[in-house]
């Protein structure tokens, strides 16, 4: 019975970790302004993400990663300094 309890506990911990990850990723979609800019059109948001994934499979992967990482860090830094900043305006710069 102890092993079954351990297995259930381990499953619960993994489930909570996954739930937290999904919530954080959803928060990034909101922070980027995609929900507002697409009028919460899930097909458009998925299309944008699929397009980004295709670019990451292309020859300009490293260039895209560098650009997107720089922009993302800029938004995180700006939000840490001025939490009320409209992130999607910053992300476009």
Image (cartoon, rainbow, N blue to C red):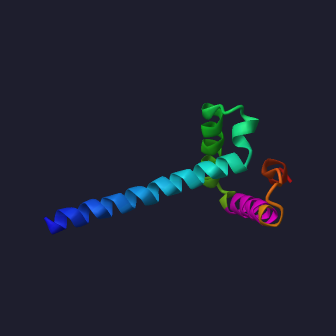
The residue positioned 73% from the left and 58% from the top of the image is: 68
- The image position of residue 72, as x and y in percent, is 73, 60
Image quarter (top left, top right, bottom left or bottom right) of the N terminus: bottom left
Prevalent SS, magenta region: helix
Figure check: 30 above or below 82: above
Front one among 27 and 2: 2
* Percent of width and height locating residue 73: 75, 65
**Residue situated furthest right in the rendering:** 93
Q: Is residue 32 magenta?
A: no
Reply yes or no: does residue 75 show up in magenta: yes
Quarter of the image with the C terminus in it: bottom right
Task: Give the quadrant of residue 47.
Answer: top right
Q: Which residue: 64% across, 38% down?
A: 45
Query: Considering only vertical position in the picture, is 34 above or below 39?
Result: below
Seen in the image, is 8 located left or right of residue 49?
Answer: left
> Which residues make up the magenta segment?
62-78
Relative depth, front residue between 18 and 68: 18
Q: Position of residue 49 (x, y in %)?
A: 62, 44
């Amino acid at each position: 019975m102890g092993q079954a309890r351990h297995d259930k506990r381990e499953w619960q911990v993994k489930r909570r970790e996954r739930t937290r990850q999904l919530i954080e990723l959803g928060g990034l979609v909101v922070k980027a302004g995609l929900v507002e800019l697409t009028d919460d059109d899930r097909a458009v948001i998925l299309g944008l993400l699929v397009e980004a994934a295709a670019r990451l499979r292309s020859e300009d992967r490293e260039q895209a990663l560098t650009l997107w990482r720089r922009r993302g860090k800029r938004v995180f830094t700006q939000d840490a300094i001025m939490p009320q900043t409209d992130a999607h305006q910053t992300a476009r710069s």
